[in-house]
Image: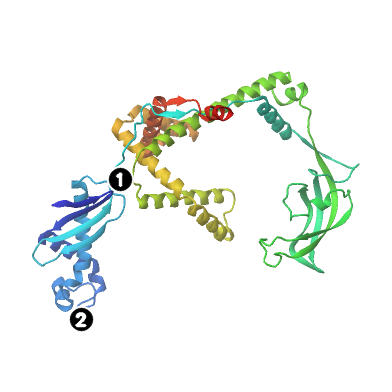
Amino acid sequence: MSKILKKEKNVVTLEFTVSPEEFENAVNKAYLKIKNSINVQGFRKGKAPRHIIEKKYGKSIFYDDALDFAVQEEYPKAVAEHNLDVIDSPKVNVEKFEEGQDIVISAEVEVMPEVELCEYKGIEVEKTEIKVTDEDVERELKAIQEKNARIVEVSDRAVQNGDFLTIDYAGFVGEEQFEGGTAENQSLEIGSNTFIPGFEEQLIGKNKDEEAEINVTFPEEYHSEELKGKAAIFKVKIHEIKTKELPAIDDEFAKDISEFDTLEELKADTKSNLEKKAADQAKIANDNNVITKIVNESKVDVPEVLITREIDYLGRNYEQQFRQQGFAGKEYDDIIKNFVDQYKEGARSQAEFNVKAELVLEAIIKKEEIKVTEEETAEEVAKVAESYQVEADRLEAFKQSILESSRAYIEETLQKRKVIDMLVAGAVFVEPKVQEAAAEEEK
């Protein structure tokens, strides 16, 4: 039997009892757990009867473990009895303990907070529109032009900004050549700022086969302790000078890079594609605007434990991004940990919003009784299976394995998708107020 003693915000204090019979069972479990670690003269280790151990060490030798067993048995029953949605481990306290009587135990536990939803149906949201301009089209064509550029060798002029060089170099601090400062046939794009500050600029005006001495000073934040802030000289030889040759943006260009015969056709198609992307981006922005406004206007005390978990989750994702970029060795562990720790320090507001959004959407799903059908689940499973390109003879078995391992996640994802679609469909989109404000300023 259990009861709720008090409830403050999302913290509930439960009280439940353990009968003498239930505690006796728990004591016996404790005996079986620890008997192998107790030495009693005259008995092989682990073979001493319970009453002999109790006589030698006292009955209380089993009580701590027995109370743990009793709580593990009775606490979940109390939670289920009061239909509590628990989000953290309980703080347990023994309130009354007398042999032969009911043991009284209290448990303080955090539960999911109540959500006070705003009036989300018909909520007004400023509409996001992304317009594609002629400048956008020109920018896209220039990007395509860059991708189709040829790198050609130059022999009749000196190095210019933007050129691609092949060089040998050797670095010296004083008269001593330093480790890691030497390379042969190294590629370098002038203006890329990939070398030490000042290095690339000093190669401008030099010629092919010319040798030059480049004077630089290593930054104070340089990764090598031996070189931080040190003046150095690099002896450089230029083997090749190459430049980027861009094709003219004309009808021939259109024919070379597309199925179109004229530049005008290519421009029209480019604009159409940009408008489709803009429409997709605007939809995502408008969906986010609706959800953000509903979340911000709803009220909920976000539990600290959920914020902490979300910060840890965001940190793990951030670390994974580094690992996927190739920073996988042990030599990167300390560097990545430092970046992740810094990221987590600034991630609190995002984590708090993420948790609040989750709680608000779950509350709306519950209120609107949004369900997912078997057909919808099966359709989503089919899409997931298709993305893996599984052989036809293994497809059904693969779908079944997805259902068995990920049904809850898939259904939850579909529920959220449906609730977001419902909220966006019910929103009223209005023109941004910026234009009105600007008009007032003109007056």
* Image coordinates for residue 345, horizontal then vertical, percent: 48, 54
Q: Tag 2's secondary structure?
A: loop
Q: As drawn, which residue projects farthest toward the left?
A: 100
Q: Tag 1's secondary structure?
A: loop
* Image coordinates for residue 245, horizontal then vertical, percent: 80, 35
Check disc 1 and report the residue beneath it. Answer: 113
Q: Tell me the kind of residue under disc 2.
A: Gln
Q: Quadrant of the C terminus?
A: top right
Q: As drawn, which residue projects farthest toward the right?
A: 156
Along the line of sight, the residue nearer the viewer: 276 or 47:
276
Q: Residues within 10 Å of mark 1 (few under 14, many from 20)?
A: some
Q: CA distance from mark 1 to mark 2?
A: 55 Å
Q: Tell me the kind of residue under disc 1.
A: Pro
In the visual, does 88 lie left or right of 318? left
**Quarter-wise, where is residue 131 in the image?**
top right
Which residue is drawn at the image coordinates 67% and 66% (left, top)?
225
Check disc 2 and report the residue beneath it. Answer: 41
In the visual, does 399 lie left or right of 198? left
Q: Is residue 313 above or below residue 294?
A: below
**Quarter-wise, where is residue 100 in the image?**
bottom left
**Quarter-wise, where is residue 124 in the image?**
top left
In the visual, does 101 lie left or right of 269? left
Marks 1 and 2 close (CB-CB < 8 Å): no
Disc with the residue nearer the chain's start (1 vs 2): 2
* Image coordinates for residue 429, horizontal then vertical, percent: 45, 25
* Residue 400 visible: no
Along the line of sight, the residue nearer the viewer: 425 or 78:
425
Which residue is drawn at the image coordinates 61% and 22% (left, top)?
272
